[in-house]
Amino acid sequence: MPSSQALAFQAPSLALLATEPLRYLLEICSAQVSTPSTVQGDGHPVVLYPGLGAGSLTTSQLRGHLRGCNFDVRDWELGVNMGPDGHLDDWLPSLVERVRALHGQEGRKVSLVGWSLGGIYAREIAKLCPDSVRQVITLATPFSSLSGGNHAGTILRMFGGDTSQVTPQLERRLRERPPVPTTSVYSESDGVVCWRGCIQRGGPQVENIAVHASHIGMPAHPDVLRIVADRLAQPEGGWKPYRRRGLRRSASTAPSRSRT
């Protein structure tokens, strides 16, 4: 039974969901001809976590773009994301250990970028090892409405996944923000998840950035590529809210939105 919080969110229409594949193809083409970011990263490690049913191929364009901006980008190295292998709390420690090990090997804190369900992993990892995480960026991640208001649960069940562990207690935990700078990129035209479920509310070093993108095209959308590179290029310890066209926006008010 969905929680009362989940019932407050409405899933995108089936008509909007049906447009996702075509919009994705258009976004891929647009990214091929768009002007790349001119930011220059500092070479710190970045781990990308794919969305449900997706693997390294679906995030390859984003990884390639970020490598071109001088970031040390890593795939999550667990193949296709079919959901947690068992209970989330039993499975997360192995992901946390990899981030801690990468931090120790490189001597630099690690930035985590997660798309959709991958963003849930990124946020929870950051909560468990904040001393090893520089910042978290999520793309179309419905951390406030994981069990309702989206089509992701249906998709997970189609893959044979188990949604029974998404209890009201877990939902409350997932809504809590990580204790590191956190950016949520979302789209009001998302055909898979309710964009309102991607909004972070309150607190310092928190921001929500709106783009006009499909859900499955998020990791390839030109605006998303630029935003992620811009966020990662900030100096460690010098995080500031995203700026666009000289407009200043508070990162602590919600549901504040910066449009590209």
Image: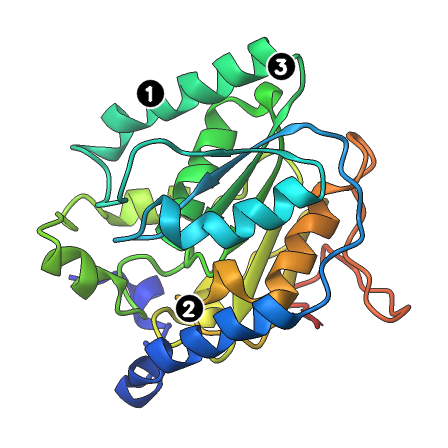
Residue situated in front as seen by the camera: 61 or 242: 61
Q: CA distance from mark 3 to mark 1?
A: 18 Å
Q: CA distance from mark 3 to mark 2?
A: 33 Å
Q: Percent x, y for residue 203?
A: 67, 48
Disc 2 crowd rating (10 Å Cα; few below 14, some 14-19, many 20+) is many
Residue beneath the point at 44% across and 64% down: 197
Dot 2 and dot 1 residues touching (CB under 8 Å): no
Dot 2: what SS? loop
Residue beneath the point at 40% across and 34% down: 76
Dot 3: what SS? helix
Residue beneath the point at 36% across and 31% down: 77
Q: Percent x, y for residue 73?
A: 56, 35
Query: Which circle's residue, 3 or 2, is located before the other in the chain?
Result: 3
Give the residue number, with chain letter if any, for mark 3: 106
Q: Which one is in front in this view, the residue at disc 3 or the one at disc 2? A: 3
Q: CA distance from mark 2 to mark 1?
A: 27 Å
Q: Which one is in front in this view, the residue at disc 3 or the one at disc 1? A: 3
What sort of colour scheme is used for the picture? rainbow
Give the residue number, with chain letter if any, for mark 2: 215
Which corner quadrant holds the C terminus?
A: bottom right
Q: Is residue 129 above or below residue 114?
A: above
Q: Is residue 40 above or below residue 14?
A: above
Q: Is residue 119 left or right of residue 52?
A: right
**Which amino acid does the dot numbered 1 rest on?**
Ser
Give the residue number, with chain letter if any, for mark 1: 94
Residue beneath the point at 31% across and 80% down: 17
**Which amino acid does the dot numbered 3 rest on?**
Glu
**Which amino acid does the dot numbered 2 rest on?**
His
